[in-house]
Amino acid sequence: MDLRRPAGLTAGASAAVVTFQQLHLAFGALAAGESSPPPMSRSAEPVVVKYLDAVLKPQLGRKEHSGGTMTVRVTKAQASGEVAAVNGCLDQTKLITYRANGTKYVDASVRRSPTLTIQTTLSRSAGIWKVSNYVLKETRC
């Protein structure tokens, strides 16, 4: 997993970006088939965890896992009070999938959409940021 963030973020936006990145590290670990990845619930509300689990369900159901490099680049980060918006780009161009038998291939969804736009909203409660809304769009970024 390669995580990239812009320089010069405000303190609030910077803290929200850290949470955004932690969520993607957990997502990437789960996709890679790690035996005990960090729980996505540390950085995301249950509705977001359910959404991202659904994204991975077909792959995990086939007992496959991801390899290679997935790059997540923050393109926008703004925070105001207890709400933040962090948007980004998910670059899958160097991502491969391993079948249960060890053979590898490039998934059709990755070939169709090598980059995806990420739009998130984060909410802060008791000083802790969590992703409260998450949308992946099949648009180039």
Image (cartoon, rainbow, N blue to C red):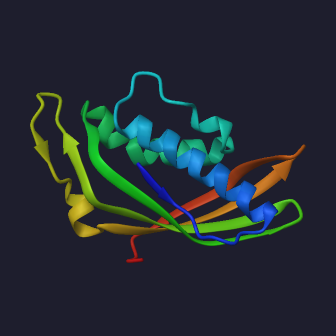
Compared with 23, 109 (above or below) is below
Between residue 32 and residue 58, name the one nearer to us: 32
Residue at (71, 69) in percent of width and height? 9
**Residue at coordinates 72% horizontally, 48% vertically from top-left?**
130
Q: Is residue 1 left or right of residue 39?
A: left
Give the quarter of the image for residue 54.
top left
Quarter occupied by the C terminus: bottom left
Position of 115 with respect to 45 (left or right) is left
Residue at the limit of the structure toward the front, as seen here: 7
Tell which of 121 and 14 is nearer to you: 14
Q: Is residue 23 left or right of residue 56?
A: right
Residue farthest to the top, as pictured: 35
Q: Position of residue 122 (x, y in %)?
A: 72, 57
- Residue 53 position (above or below residue 81): above
Residue at image point 47% right, 22% down? 36
Q: Position of residue 138 (x, y in %)?
A: 39, 71
- Residue 4 pos. (x, y %): 50, 61
Q: How many marks?
A: 0
Question: Which residue appears at 40% of the width and 58% of the height?
Answer: 71
Residue lying at the far bottom in this picture: please name it. Answer: 140
